[in-house]
Image: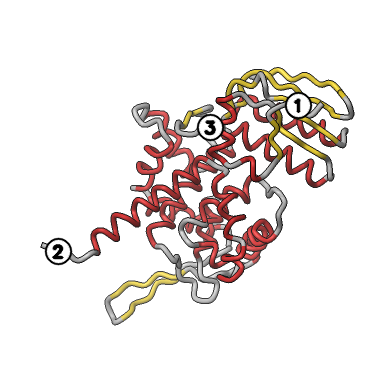
Amino acid sequence: MIQVTQETRAGWHVVGVRGRADSEAADELEGALRAAVEAHPKVAADFAALDYISSAGLRAVLQAARAAQQRNAEFAVCSPSARVQKVFDMSGLQHVLRIYGELPC
Amino acid sequence: MLEEVVLLAVDEKTGGLRSTREFGTAYALVGAVLFDLALAGKIDTDTEVIQIIDGKPTGNTTLDRVLVEMSRRRDLNTVQDWIEHIYHRKADLEGEALASLIQQGILCHEKSKRMWFVDVERFPMVNDRPQQHVKLRLAEAIRTDGIPDTRDIMLISIAEPCGLLSFVVDDAELARRRDRIQMLCNLETISRKVARAIGRLDGTLRAQMMPRII
């Protein structure tokens, strides 16, 4: 289960995600991120409060990043917790999309 | 995805089932079943563990049989456990996928004898468009630098370790895009474990073929 917040700061649309990005939450996560990249040129997914991400959650993030690429929108994943960062490292996600240690705004 | 893996393995000229790494294709079939269950929202994985999210039937006989078995065997809970467990059903997986492709009018089934007593089975293409479509999708995902569709990432990542991508693009292009392919293969836990299982099997076979030095 996840909770999603949205705000705009210094030209970036920040999608804050809290909770567990698993199979149950994957559609909601992908939907929120996709809607953001369709409406804004610069989107940061703030994962500071994301406790866990499964393969389904990872696919949701990837497909949102794919939608951003297709629209030439900027998309970054920011502030992942150590546990989530470990999953990103194992899957080599840093080779596919931008991952920042902190929010860019 | 199971049918797409089998389609990649069918030689469009002879109807024979081909693979550059015979045992690898069986592992690719196992990976395909697990990906099909993941795409159907029935299972999810993290970096090691596999979880059943929804045990209700999908309507596909092969997937439902595996799903029922997964629900019963709570002692097996890692992706690796299940890859090795389902691997023993590889003949069923291939046979059922071929039967489905025949039923859909994509392949036909021919039996013949070689040297009067060796049974030879072939699966000539009746309709080559589905195979061409799969190949085109995968070639596009390999050649371009964008993020591919989830399904194409999954298919590339299980086709690569068993050598099926050499039937999609030529060897020179495969070598040129090696880093890209490896990057796509690494994205999914199931694929990483499939590649590891194939690597382990290769190691075992090599060790068995080495002459014994006493």
Residue A30 coordinates in the image, percent (x, y): 71, 32
Quadrant for residue B101, please give it.
Answer: bottom right
Q: Secondary structure at mark 1?
A: loop
Are the residues under badges 2 and 3 in a single subunit?
A: yes
Q: Residues within 10 Å of mark 3 (few under 14, many from 20)?
A: many
Residue B178 coordinates in the image, percent (x, y): 57, 60
Q: CA distance from mark 1 to mark 3?
A: 29 Å
Callout 2: chain: B
Q: Residues within 10 Å of mark 1 (few under 14, many from 20)?
A: some
**Does residue B61 appear anywhere in the picture?**
no
Residue at the far bottom in the pictured view: B115
Q: Amino acid at mark 1?
A: Leu
Of discs 1 and 3, which sits in the foreground? 1
Q: CA distance from mark 2 to mark 3?
A: 46 Å
Residue B36 coordinates in the image, percent (x, y): 54, 43
Q: Amino acid at mark 2?
A: Ile
Most foreground residue, B45 or A10: A10
Most foreground residue, B140 or B35: B140
Residue A100, above or below B127: above
- What's the mark number on residue B213? 2
Model colouring: secondary structure
- What's the mark number on residue B44? 3
- In the image, is B189 to the left or to the right of A103? left
